[in-house]
Amino acid sequence: MTFFTWILRMKDIKENPVCFPGETEQPIYSEDGVDLTLIRWMLSLTPAERLQVLQQQILSISKLKNGTRRTNT
């Protein structure tokens, strides 16, 4: 899953939250201020998709730490 695909999927999840059985209306934030849509989104992914998202985040953080920039080729 590319970052762009992830953004589109996040937009879709926020517009159409994942509904769990027995729930009708879901809060967006917990009482502690946690964004529940992110948790629902991550739970909607397969384990392989979760791993791929996390690996991409690690790669992005690594690039930021190293000052690596993308070049147009």
Image (cartoon, helix red, strand yellow):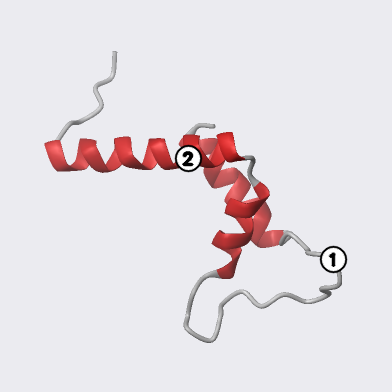
Q: Residue 53 carries which label?
A: 2
Pinpoint residue 18: horizontal percent, then vertical percent.
Answer: 73, 59
Q: In the rendered structure, which amino acid carries the disc numbered 1?
A: Pro
Identify which residue is drawn at 50% across, 32% down: 2
Asked whether disc 2 touches disc 1, contact meaning CB atoms under 8 Å apart, the reply is no
Which marked residue is nearer to the observer: mark 2 or mark 1?
1
Pinpoint residue 59: horizontal percent, then vertical percent.
Answer: 31, 35
Identify which residue is drawn at 17% across, 31% down: 68
Farthest top residue? Answer: 73
Quadrant including the C terminus: top left
Identify which residue is drawn at 52% across, 70% down: 35
Q: Which mark is residue 21?
A: 1
Q: Is mark 1 on a helix, strand or loop?
A: loop
- Whether 38 is drawn above or below 3: the answer is below
Quadrant including the N terminus: top right
Farthest front residue? Answer: 47
User: Between residues 39 and 10, which one lies in front from this camera angle?
Assistant: 39
User: Between residues 21 and 27, which one lies in front from this camera angle?
Assistant: 21
Q: Which mark is residue 47?
A: none
Pinpoint residue 29: horizontal percent, then vertical percent.
Answer: 56, 77
Alpha carbon separation for disc pair 2 and 1: 26 Å
User: Between residues 18 and 50, which one lies in front from this camera angle?
Assistant: 50
Q: Quadrant of residue 30?
A: bottom right
